[in-house]
């Protein structure tokens, strides 16, 4: 009887995987992909769901990895209201035990290439540590508005730009990460050209492109996983109402700002992996973003 019981117990444990708390979650690398259940459940189970995409099918052999992250150092651009940007001090020594280097850094949550957690603009919404992984790792699309941004620093992604994209590439799939390419990353780290004004502490003369509230609503309708932009903010420089921020935050959609090198990512076909520092309770966090380009 005993070996039989043991076999039954082993079989049961192999089939059953208990749900884990989201902050302990492991998403198996062979099963990373969009599944709606992941987004709204406070738990992630390791069970199979219909619609999951094996990693091997979205990261083809020979793909190129593109780092969409600006370096964090003393040149890193922060929102002008911040008194201090990225700070790091380091110490190095060479002793009998060999070389030793150590350092410490501090940073505001919003600056450089970073995550805007939904809690940034909506009380009670997801904080940086609670954003589900499938919102941070997904198929990506890039919508280009660089031509109109070149002509007008305050240009906005509008619903018409989304219509034009969808006419060419089809309707944006649920679970996509939508990146807005304005061409502004080429101005980094020149504060004056990137923000429109380099006055520390002042936010009333900013000029750079962004996303309109109406376009943000359209992307929420498309059930996108996350959005990103290669400027300092989702809302354009002159914004006082921060409509795009509010629309995405209320829909629990995380965002990435100051994204680099979107010129190297095709409009369709890439996968983006954007993993922020898991700051407990954070309204945002530095993020390392990588595009896998087939
Ligand atoms: Zn931010």
Image: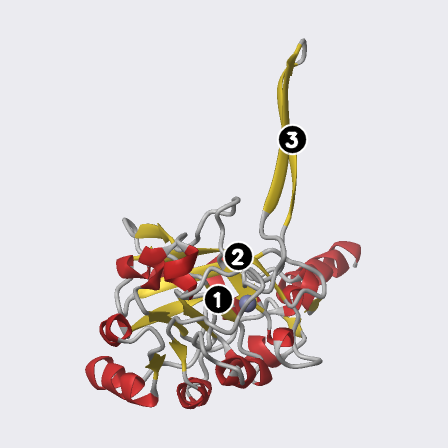
SS of the residue at dot 3? strand
Instruction: Give the image quarter of residue 151.
Output: bottom left
Residue behind mark 1:
256
Residue 15, position as x, y percentages in the image: 62, 66
Task: Kindly identify which numbered label has been placed on residue 102.
Answer: 3
Residue 262 visible? The answer is yes
Residue 218, position as x, y percentages in the image: 41, 89
In the rendered image, the vertical position of residue 226 relative to residue 261, given as above or below: below
Residue behind mark 2:
287
For the N terminus, which image quadrant?
Answer: bottom right
Mark 1 and 2 residues: CB-CB less than 8 Å, in contact? yes
SS of the residue at dot 2? strand
Residue 17, position as x, y percentages in the image: 66, 66
Mark 2 or mark 3: name the one nearer the start of the chain: 3
Instruction: Give the image quarter of residue 178.
Output: bottom left
Q: Which of 4 and 74 is in front in this view?
A: 74
In the rendered image, the vertical position of residue 101 relative to residue 188, given as above or below: above
Q: How many marks?
A: 3
In the rendered image, the vertical position of residue 33 relative to residue 74, given as above or below: below
Structural crowding at the residue carrying mark 3, measured as other residues with C-alpha within 10 Å and reported as few (<14), some (14–19) or many (≥20): few
Mark 3 and 1 residues: CB-CB less than 8 Å, in contact? no
Residue 150, position as x, y percentages in the image: 25, 70
Residue sitting at the far left:
168
Horizontally, residue 46 falls left or right of residue 164, namely: right
């Amino acid at each position: 009887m005993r070996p039989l019981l043991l076999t039954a117990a082993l079989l049961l444990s192999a089939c059953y995987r208990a749900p884990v708390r989201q902050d302990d979650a492991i998403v198996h690398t062979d099963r990373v992909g969009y599944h709606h259940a992941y987004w709204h459940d406070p738990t992630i189970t390791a069970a199979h769901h219909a619609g999951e995409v094996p990693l091997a099918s979205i990261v083809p052999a020979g793909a190129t990895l593109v780092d969409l992250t600006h370096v964090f150092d003393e040149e890193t651009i922060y929102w002008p209201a911040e008194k201090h940007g990225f700070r790091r001090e380091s110490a190095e020594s060479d002793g009998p035990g060999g070389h030793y280097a150590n350092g410490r850094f501090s940073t505001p949550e919003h600056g450089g290439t970073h995550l805007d957690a939904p809690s940034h603009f909506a009380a009670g919404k997801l904080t940086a540590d609670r954003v589900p992984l499938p919102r941070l790792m997904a198929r990506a699309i890039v919508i280009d508005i660089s031509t109109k941004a070149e002509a007008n620093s305050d240009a906005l992604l509008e619903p018409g730009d989304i219509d034009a994209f969808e006419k060419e590439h089809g309707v944006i799939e649920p679970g996509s990460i939508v990146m807005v390419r304005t061409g502004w990353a080429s101005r980094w780290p020149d504060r004056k050209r990137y923000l429109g004004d380099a006055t520390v502490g002042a936010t009333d003369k900013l000029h750079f492109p962004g996303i309109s509230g109406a376009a943000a609503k359209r992307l929420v309708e498309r059930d996108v996983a996350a959005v990103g932009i290669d400027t300092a903010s989702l809302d354009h420089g002159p914004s006082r109402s921060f409509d795009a921020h509010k629309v995405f935050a209320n829909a629990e959609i995380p965002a990435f700002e100051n994204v680099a090198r979107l010129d190297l990512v095709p409009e369709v076909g890439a996968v983006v992996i954007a993993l922020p520092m898991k700051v407990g309770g954070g309204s945002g966090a530095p993020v390392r973003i990588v595009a896998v380009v087939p």
